[in-house]
Image: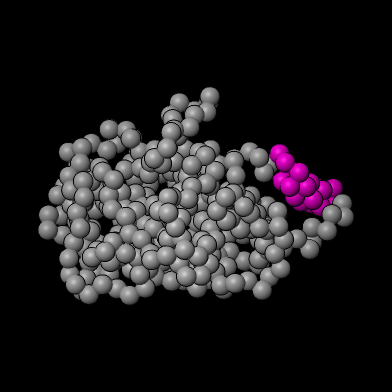
């Protein structure tokens, strides 16, 4: 609370990736939304180490570390670099992914880079008329508003005709105004089965997580031009840019990297909320975590001191049409020629 912007307090603690040159194995979890996953992938992609590997799995935070799968991987890595043992690590692919399917099913696949070079970056436009996600931008200029601390709105694709794999980082572009000087946006990437029921997954801590999540405070919308890419908006968080009355601001919002193979007949959804995602079922608990978990684990944004209602409790408006074409950019992966192995 004493340091709401990125200042010297954080700079003194920030990693200089150019100095990270040791061999590294970064093990990430698709369900680690809110804490580790982005750091795992940032560390892998930005570290200067010439010898670096990435592994991404699902399930709970600790299971992969202690089970045979994880122990074997770690021993091969450490025995190779610390003991000089022959573990065949020199033939380990640079990227090992457990590709996630509904029902907590994972299929191991090896890749050579992250994000995947063959990614088909695809824009799905938000259509306010039918609350659709589609590949064609809407023409009519209109708007949708919702309570700034409320459940927001959901946009859905039509039922998929064929299987669709989403693996990688996503990014949304929204055009937003508010009745107050600021707004918090919570974006949730979701999947629904043919009966309209949301498909949720075991996260690192929370047993009922959505496919992906992203967050942005509108006043922190300033981008770092050196680090931002078309698929990864990178915010500086070093200045406040309040919303002005009558102004529509452009917000580029990162949705953390994820993986899901969506079956035919299912729908992909994007929900734009004014508060944290909440699964509709009963909350889960852990003995060492004080907050009941409703889909975000313990990583929630519910401190009234950080979100005073006089600033964040107005109405948020999404704008559409003309030069304003809100969309989400999804990392669609075509059928892979790489040999798959069931895990």
Q: Is residue 265 left or right of residue 172?
A: right
Quarter residue 259 falls in: bottom right
Task: Evaluate whether residue 150 shows in this view.
Answer: yes
Query: In the rendering, at what x and y percent does residue 147 appear?
Result: 21, 46
- Report the label total: 0
Quarter residue 234 falls in: bottom left
Residue 268, above or below 118: above
Q: In this view, does 144 lie to the left or right of 212?
A: left
Q: Residue at x 42, y 37 (%)?
A: 281
Secondary structure, magenta segment, majority class: helix
Q: Is residue 181 left or right of residue 132?
A: left
Looking at the picture, tell me which residue is in the foreground, 82 or 200.
Answer: 200
Q: Which residue is drawn at 46% across and 55% down?
A: 193
Query: In the rendering, at what x and y percent does residue 135 appear?
Result: 37, 73
Residue 263, above or below 213: below
Task: Evaluate whether residue 184 shows in this view.
Answer: no
Range shown magenta? 66-84
Looking at the picture, tell me which residue is in the foreground, 241 or 332.
Answer: 332
């Amino acid at each position: 609370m004493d340091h709401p912007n990125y200042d010297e307090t954080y700079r003194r603690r920030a990693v200089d990736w150019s100095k990270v040159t040791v061999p590294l194995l970064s093990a990430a979890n698709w369900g680690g939304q809110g804490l580790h996953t982005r750091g795992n992938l940032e560390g892998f992609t930005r570290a200067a180490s010439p010898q670096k590997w990435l592994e991404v799995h699902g399930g709970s935070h600790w299971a992969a570390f202690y089970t045979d799968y994880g122990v074997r991987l770690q021993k091969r890595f450490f025995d190779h670099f610390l003991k000089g043992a022959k573990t065949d690590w020199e033939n380990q692919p640079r990227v090992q992914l457990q590709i996630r399917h509904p029902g907590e099913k994972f299929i191991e696949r090896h890749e050579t880079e992250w994000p995947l070079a063959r990614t088909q970056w695809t824009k799905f436009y938000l259509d306010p008329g039918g609350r659709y996600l589609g590949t064609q931008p809407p023409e009519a200029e209109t708007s949708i508003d919702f309570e700034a601390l409320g459940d927001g709105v959901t946009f859905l694709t039509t039922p998929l005709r064929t299987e669709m794999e989403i693996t990688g980082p996503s990014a949304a572009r929204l055009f937003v105004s508010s009745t107050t000087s600021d707004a918090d946006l919570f974006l949730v990437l979701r999947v629904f089965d043919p009966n309209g029921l949301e498909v949720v997954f075991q996260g690192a801590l929370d047993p009922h997580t959505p496919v992906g999540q992203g967050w942005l405070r509108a006043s922190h919308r300033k981008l770092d031009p050196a680090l931002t890419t078309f698929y990864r908006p990178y915010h500086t968080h070093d200045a406040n840019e309040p919303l002005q009355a009558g102004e529509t601001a452009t917000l580029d919002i990162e949705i953390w990297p994820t993986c899901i193979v969506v079956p035919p007949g299912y729908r992909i959804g994007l929900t734009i909320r004014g508060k944290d995602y909440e699964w509709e079922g009963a909350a889960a608990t852990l003995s060492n975590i004080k907050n009941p978990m409703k889909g975000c684990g313990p990583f929630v944004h519910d401190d009234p001191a950080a979100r005073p209602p006089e600033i964040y409790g107005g109405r948020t408006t999404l704008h559409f049409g003309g030069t304003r074409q809100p969309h989400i950019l999804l990392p669609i992966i075509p059928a892979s020629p790489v040999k798959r192995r069931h895990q």
